Image (tube, grey):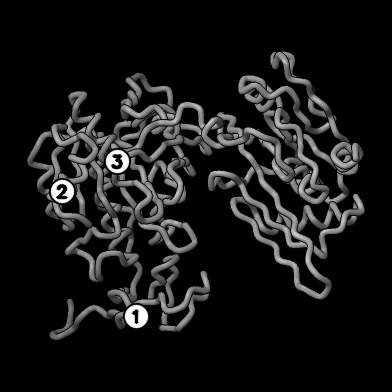
Amino acid sequence: MLRSGYLPRMAKPKRRYVCQACGAVSTRWQGQCADCSEWNTLTEEAPQTVFSSKHDLSSGGRPIIFTPLDAPGELPVRRASGLAEFDRALGGGLVPGSAILMGGDPGIGKSTLLLQVSAHIANSGGLSVYVSGEEAAGQVRLRAERLGLSKAPIQMASATSVRDILTTLGSMETPALLVIDSIQTMHSDQIEGAPGTVSQVRGCAFELIRYAKENGVTLILVGHVTKDGNIAGPRVLEHMVDVVMSFEGERSHQYRILRSLKNRFGPVDEIGVFSMEGAGLAEVGNPSMLFLSGRDEPMAGSAVFPAMEGTRPVLIEIQALIVRLQSGATPRRAVVGWDNGRMAMLLAVLEARCGLNFSSAEVYLNVAGGYRLSDPAADLAVAAALVSALGDKPLSSNAVWFGEVSLAGEIRPVAHSSIRQRESAKLGFAKAFGPASAPAEEGSKGLAFTGLGMLPNLVDRILGDA
């Protein structure tokens, strides 16, 4: 029996400080986060009370039902969003019961894209619910009117309380699509802290995802991004969802790229390309023509690279400019759309293996259209553009270049060389330069393939005809 006045021993509440950038937990406040090195991001959250005795979780729960992997039953059927480029990035369409996290810079067009998807779902017979925590209902209606979607039967609300949202959804017909714009504005009265804190984002996302899984609802969460382009909030948010998408582009350019970074129901690295028009986002069926526009006359420092985005080849123009400086001036290196460190490595290989001199010149590299490249096969095209700009010799306007360059100056083989050649031939290119070990694609009629073994072979081909 317990003695009178006896209470179970409990540890003192522990203070915890959580980084709002990466979610790391610290027992004391400090100016800089030890994990992500961000400054002034640690905020105190509700203390945790821990019992001194261990709790036994091996009993008291309800049994769960296991099913074999080959159990009979119907698999979820994907639903078309009405935008083929959006479905391509998702791997074929919206999966019922899935949770999608979409991030992107402010003003890039996330809300516009999701409003267009919601309108198509609603017009095709499915119930579409759009909850905005950042805009009033009247503001969303103004955007819908501008996009010509004011007649779409979308159920729209402006709310930030997750309890209110889930209570309302439980009293109505189960929607086919639920859009939350954005998860950083959602708030739960069960969790202490302001909206946007790590605990609030994690808790609100968990409740919304659980509702979507239990009711077969496709859930799309809009996420804010940090200055580095990463989705704000705890990293665990990306683990909780099924699909992570990034909506990219420059507001000064008309095109937008929807990129799949994680996808449990389809391939990753697929992209959808859109063009921002006055009436909303329009699909771009052939993005290569968009990135190659305006190439009427050959110019020095311009090379075309057949990039691979998932299963889709996209032809990109790479531009280089070399400016000679007076002696004693410090040369500048500027890169837009490519890795700065990789260009520095490529310049070093060109100097060490090919005898070229870039040390007394400013080097500028740009991927046309604001496109961002991460494909290592772009090395050869970048090298061709740099050598062409250095020698002021234009490259052939009907040629493409692809291949990875090693530190020894070798041109190494890359994946999907046949697909790159076929796409180039389809767009009217007559020449392709790549690794010597890459086979010429027989199905590419009218395309002559030339294999290059070492980087000096490239330099001789461009500058040797002087």
Q: x%, y% of residue 129?
A: 18, 40
Specify whether 75 is left or right of 371: left
Q: Residue at x 42, y 34 (%)?
A: 90
- Residue 387 vs residue 220, the one in the foreground: 387
Q: Residues within 10 Å of mark 2 (few under 14, many from 20)?
A: few
- Residue 267 vs residue 117, the one in the foreground: 117
Q: Which residue is mark 3?
A: 114
Q: Is residue 203 above or below residue 48?
A: above
**Of tags 3 and 2, which is closer to the observer?**
3
Specify whether 6 is left or right of 73: left
The numbered mark, 1 or 3, whose residue comes first in the sequence reads: 1
Q: Which residue is mark 2?
A: 166
- Label 1 is placed on what type of residue? Arg
Q: Which residue is mark 1?
A: 15
Q: Residue at x 39, y 50 (%)?
A: 103
Can residue 74 be seen by looking at this rendering?
Answer: yes
C-alpha separation, residue under disc 1 versus residue under disc 3: 40 Å
C-alpha separation, residue under disc 2 versus residue under disc 1: 31 Å
Secondary structure type for disc 1: strand
Residue 421 placement: quadrant: top right
Q: Is residue 29 above or below residue 206?
A: below
